[in-house]
Image: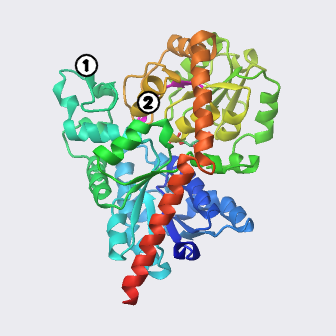
Amino acid sequence: MESEKRQLHLFIFPYMAAGHMIPAIDMAKLFASRGLRITIITTPLNASSILKTVEKSKILGLKMDMLIIEFPAEQVGLPKGSESYHLATAPDLRMKFLEAITLLRQPLEELVQDYCPDCLITSALFPWTTDVARRFGIPRLIFHATSSFSICASECLRLYEPYKKVSSDSEPFILPNFPDEIKLTRNQLPDFVTQDIETDVGKLIRQVIKAELTSDGAVFNSFYDLEPAYADYYKKVLGRKAWHIGPVSLCNKESEDKARRGKEASVHGHECLKWLDSKKPDSVVYVCFGSMANFNDSQLMEIAMGLEASQQQFIWVVKREKTQGTKDEWLPEEFEKRVEGKGLIIRGWAPQLLILDHEAVGGFVTHCGWNSTLEGVVAGVPMVTWPVSAEQFYNEKLVTQILKIGVGVGAQQWVRFLGDSIGKEAIEKALIRVMVGEEAEEMRSRARELMKMAKSSAEGGGSSYSDLNALIEDLSSHAIAGEATENN
Ligand code: UDP
């Protein structure tokens, strides 16, 4: 009973990248909706993108706030305003970005000292926050913005190094002692896993793993029934504490909240919804590759041709601005004229949740970033999987082999930001497979089942709801124990 009276105060400190910030803010709202006091720690430019959300939460009576720490871009030689990882496209910029992040330790310590939160929930990519939490005698939980499956796969690769036992980069190997038979190739693994030389990212990843072993547990944006074997593997085989409290995107109930995640959308939400309203259920495929992947002109051209050849209606999100009076070199001649009424190109940022939620959307071409993958699951749509980099090749396996709600476009090569080259025929074929025919219907019906499971996990009595309760209970007990020690 005592734990119910005490208002817990959590610091949430997400990594500076849309794929981390977006689910962390959703998680903050989720905690705040259960009566906890939340302070989000971030840097000035990232703060501006979440300001409206924080203000709205306050108006609704939630205890949600923000504290801003300067990002020392110029101090490490980065251009002013380089506060998001997607801007670190070249190796030297990445190195500087990582260096700037380590400099955030002192300002974080000062905030912890001043505000005395009960717990730090921080990105896995801030391993030093475990030490900060230790120093102040509070728990540090890791917020994993990815699947349990992918964390387990990474750990399995680290422990058994099966990729060292094959003779070529394209020869498949099996993940040893894994719940399912999962085949990968060296080509599909992140460069920092396979490279023998020590890179800055490789060094960071080793620190991340070490800090994970000594932190107080991990919070996953996932739900138990989606990947039970891997939620269990993480806890029982790897022996770590975890709470699966997702899909956190479900906390966005109103259209305004769904439209505002991440950045202001480049199209007005109503505009694309009106367009979708004119379409039949399950008749439009949504194509989007997250916040980081950035294909070159020739790859975009192949996508355009594949879309047109497949004869499917589509919404395609492309990170290119329209320049008045100039031709888009990445589009075939007269493409937009030919597909008028049939296809919509969004240049910039799309209101992804609103689009996926619409009943006209019947398929999703995704790069398998975890947020997008889970948002696809919540929308109950089959997917064309097109992994590019990060842990996306692992997530692809979960979608295609275990959940069986998607087909691969055939990407074989991990390439940071750019991905493998995929030809128009492969794109056309994969689009048709997820949109038309018996196989598509079977995948759609499995996807619909998962959608129902996702939604019920977040409701009272559901597994994510209960895991969140358990986590709050644990934190309350820890905070009370801490107070008792202080008073003695
Ligand atoms: N997103 C969006 N509009 C876009 C592109 C991305 O709202 O035009 C959101 C998407 O809904 C997801 C996040 O950005 O929540 C991307 O995260 P993900 O893990 O899928 O990929 P990443 O960007 O980290 O590669």
Q: Nearer the viewer, residue 2 or 184?
A: 2
Give, as a three-letter code, the residue at label 1.
Glu
Q: Position of residue 54 (x, y in %)?
A: 66, 63
Q: Judging from the image, what secondary structure is the residue with disc 2 in?
A: helix
Q: Which residue is mark 1?
A: 171
Visible in this render: residue 292? Answer: no
Q: Position of residue 336 (x, y in %)?
A: 72, 21
Query: Is 278 part of what is drawn in magenta?
Result: no
Magenta stretch, overall SS: loop
On the rendered structure, is 408 left or right of 76? Answer: right
Give the answer, above or below, for where 116 lies relative to 60: below
Instruction: Identify the image quadrant of the N terminus.
Output: bottom right
Please tell me whether mark 2 or mark 1 is closer to you in this view: 2
Residue extent of the magenta highlight: 382-392
Q: Which residue is mark 2?
A: 398
Give, as a three-letter code, the residue at label 2.
Leu
Badge 1, how many Cα within 10 Å: few under 14, some, many 20+?
Answer: some
Residue at the (57%, 67%) spot, across then down? 38
On the rendered structure, is 231 left or right of 296? Answer: left
Q: Quadrant of ligand 1?
A: top right
Q: Position of residue 104 (x, y in %)?
A: 41, 67
Q: CA distance from mark 2 to mark 1?
A: 20 Å
Give the answer, above or below, for where 117 lies relative to 488: above
Specify the quadrant of the image occupied by residue 342: top right
Q: Judging from the image, what secondary structure is the residue with disc 1 in?
A: loop
Residue at the (33%, 71%) spot, across then down? 134
